[in-house]
Amino acid sequence: MLARLSVIAAENYFVDAHAVLDGMVERERLGPTGFGGGTAIPHCKISGIDMPVAVFVRLSKPVPYDAVDDEPVDLVCALVSPAQDGASHLRALAEVSRLFRDEKFRAQLRGAADSSAMYAVLTFYEERDVA
């Protein structure tokens, strides 16, 4: 799964897929990033980007992930941040973890009919928090 997320990040944000994969694998060695409630937030910091970027996926079948609650994971937000900006990385992690703690948010993502509907859920929550 991490390899696929790395490729998606590379295709969408023009980052080095190998650097992303290596960074996420290294981070997972420190401890799994399964957040609970069927969610995971694999993350890393790499050179060559100016701001945090994310790849969100909803898996068709939950996968074992060694999450804190031992539940399989079906909602994944991979976060890639600039190597030199730890503060933006921590802010982005905090935002994603706050969203993933919201049971209604998770239910809406799981109930979304397609990627456009998932994008609408993600965008609504982002805009709601800005207002």
Image (tube, rainbow, N blue to C red):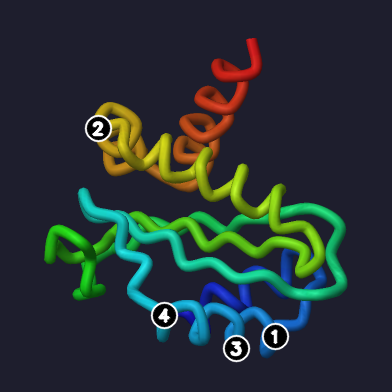
User: What's the CA distance linking mark 4 and mark 1?
Assistant: 17 Å
Marker disc for residue 30: 4
CB under 8 Å between discs 1 and 3: yes
Q: Mark 3 — residue?
A: 22
Q: Quadrant of residue 112?
A: top left
User: What's the CA distance linking mark 1 and mark 3?
Assistant: 5 Å
Marker disc for residue 19: 1
Q: Quadrant of residue 39?
A: bottom left
Provide the secondary structure element on which disc 3 rests.
Answer: helix
> What is the three-letter code of the residue carrying label 4?
Leu
Crowding at mark 4 (Cα within 10 Å: few <14, some 14-19, many 20+): few
Provide the secondary structure element on which disc 4 rests.
Answer: helix
> What is the three-letter code of the residue carrying label 2?
Glu
User: What's the CA distance linking mark 2 and mark 4?
Assistant: 27 Å
Report the front residue among 21 and 82. Answer: 82
Please tell me how many numbered marks the rendered image carries: 4
Residue 8, given in percent of the width and then of the height, sits at: 62, 71
Provide the secondary structure element on which disc 1 rests.
Answer: helix
Image point (42%, 36%), residue name: 98
Q: Earlier in the sequence, mark 1 or mark 2?
A: 1
Image point (46%, 36%), residue name: 117
> What is the three-letter code of the residue carrying label 1?
Ala
> What is the three-letter code of the residue carrying label 3?
Asp
Crowding at mark 3 (Cα within 10 Å: few <14, some 14-19, many 20+): some
Report the front residue among 28 and 72. Answer: 28
Image point (14%, 58%), residue name: 69
Q: Earlier in the sequence, mark 3 or mark 2?
A: 3
Q: Mark 2 — residue?
A: 103
